[in-house]
Image (tube, rainbow, N blue to C red):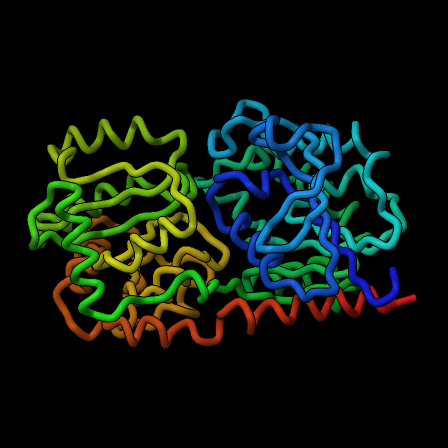
Amino acid sequence: MSAGKIRPLIIYQMDPLGNKIGGIQTFIKNFIKYAPDDFEIEFVGVSADTRRAKVGAWQTIEMYERQVNFLPVLFKSDENIRSRIPLSMQFTAQLMRYRHSIDLHDRIVNFHRIEPGIPFALAPCRKVLVVHGNMTDLYNPGTEVKWRRFPWAYFGMEKLLMPGMSKVFVVREDGAAFYKKRYPSLAERFSFLPTWVDDAMFYPLAAPEKATAKVAFLQQQGLPGDTKLALFVGRLAGQKDPLLLLDAFCELRKQEPQTHLLIVGQGNLRQEMEERLRRYGMSKHAAFLGPLTQPEVAGLMRICDVFVMTSAFEGMPISVLEALACGLPVVSTDVGEVRRVIRDELSGLVCHDRMPDTIGGNVARVLREERFSARNCTASIQEYTAGKVLNRMYAAFISLGARP
């Protein structure tokens, strides 16, 4: 390593200055934002705007008042739309093409999917992999990952590449246990790393400020002053099960007819969702807001009344932590690590089944009962702020950088 410097090289299929939404994107951006001053970060990814970032050329970009060297190897005009050929495969193919433009000397290469490790399988560099879930979810019928058709091929590829990883962080505790059992000779390399919230961006408003901001938003949207706001943030795709969200919303409105649903995100289920809302006669009671920036999402979370997540599976969803950090109680399906941060009967409710009436009924309870306070919500995530969690990951990079 360069004297006194740690040089992470992040390789992931996103434009670091783009508007792709999702937990992995937030994870990476926060890693960059809070990295120690002696971390010289480089990024190999995707360009969503070739006027700003030319494919195939290294350039310097500014992120969070720090300089990051950036090499886009692929152009993707809209990162939120899935293509017929998985983006991970397109990205990996382009990595093969530009492999010799990527200097690995003194770098600690950081992957957030296993596939991009293929071009670097034989490279004698230190590698850190972050697994954002439990890969047994490939067998979940709600997944839209193409590997679901060939899970044996995925795990075969993983078996070849995993021994080359110096450290593997897994954002689900059962996922870390799964890998330790699957690769006993590598067990010490696997660690559970919870996700975190950027509490400098996601924080609650005082009650009078929230009331004023909410009234302004309702007026802007042409909604009555007594409207309750339910918020969903995520891809409109199978894993997030937004159709179940609408079924639950239909049940909710039977109990709380003044509730309005705000939907942040986009994806291939948008049209089907609009059709289902029409069928339920609820089109005017829900609004599709499209993908929003983190500050815009934080602003919404600070004025809404409940956050709803209906995912079929998750790791440790950042959106749940962000909602709680904004003082917003959460109703969620029982997935991933949500029970680690949602304190039942205090900061939200975890549903015991995936039935629309159960989810809708729990949302109604949260809207009616005062126990689900902003104070209880923020208390739920005190151990999962960026500063507390990321230091563990930075320490691993520093340790790898110190090795001869």
User: Which percent across, then down, holds residue 203?
Assistant: 36, 66
Pick out the residue farthest to the top: 84
User: Which percent across, then down, holds residue 223?
Assistant: 10, 44
User: Which percent across, then down, holds residue 357?
Assistant: 18, 51
State whether residue 87 is above or below residue 20.
above
Q: Residue at x 17, y 60 (%)?
A: 212
Pick out the residue farthest to the right: 404
Q: Residue at x 90, y 50 (%)?
A: 124
On the image, which quarter does residue 299 sit in? bottom left
Lateral position of residue 386 relative to residue 158, left or right:
left
Figure quadrant of the N terminus: bottom right
On the image, which quarter does residue 88 sit in? top right
Lateral position of residue 148 relative to residue 7, left or right:
left
Q: Residue at x 70, y 65 (%)?
A: 37
Q: How many marks?
A: 0
Figure quadrant of the C terminus: bottom right
